[in-house]
Amino acid sequence: MRTRRSTVEYPYGTIKAWMGATHFLTKTLSRVSTEISLHVLAYNLKRMMRIMGTGSLIQAIQA
């Protein structure tokens, strides 16, 4: 349980906090799916910027 909490719950908690922790801003499954996909993409990009640094991330994107 400790391992699960540290590896899985943290990203969902962070994304939920960014969203306001209450609800999605859109309706219908396709729009909600798009909204959560954008949140996950933003989370992953911010994480990669912290891990790799912005310079090497820009180089990787351009390659």
Image (spheres, rainbow, N blue to C red):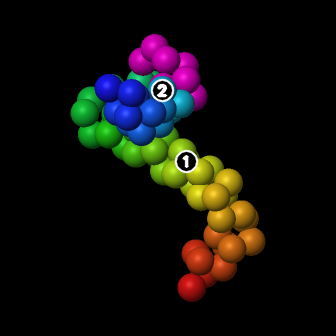
Element type at marker 1?
helix
Specify whether 19 is left or right of 9.
right
CB atoms of marks 2 and 1 within 8 Å: no
Q: Relative to the observer, which residue lies in front, 55 or 24?
A: 55
* Res 61 → quadrant: bottom right
- Amino acid beneath label 1: Ala
Q: Is residue 23 above or below residue 52?
A: above
Q: Is residue 32 above or below residue 47?
A: above
Look at the image and say whether residue 29 sits in the magenta stretch. no
- Give the class, few, some or many, for how many residues have Cα within 10 Å of label 1's Cα (few <14, many ≥20): few
Q: Give the extent of the magenta segment.
A: 16-23
Q: Is residue 26 visible?
A: no
Which numbered tag is attached to residue 3?
none
Q: Relative to the observer, which residue lies in front, 30 or 1?
A: 1
Please provide percent x and percent y for residue 11: 47, 36
* Res 45 → quadrant: bottom right
- Residue under the point 74% across and 71% down: 55
- Residue under the point 32% across and 26% down: 1
Where does label 2 land, which residue? 13
Please provide percent x and percent y for residue 38: 47, 45
Where does label 1 land, which residue? 42
- Amino acid beneath label 2: Gly
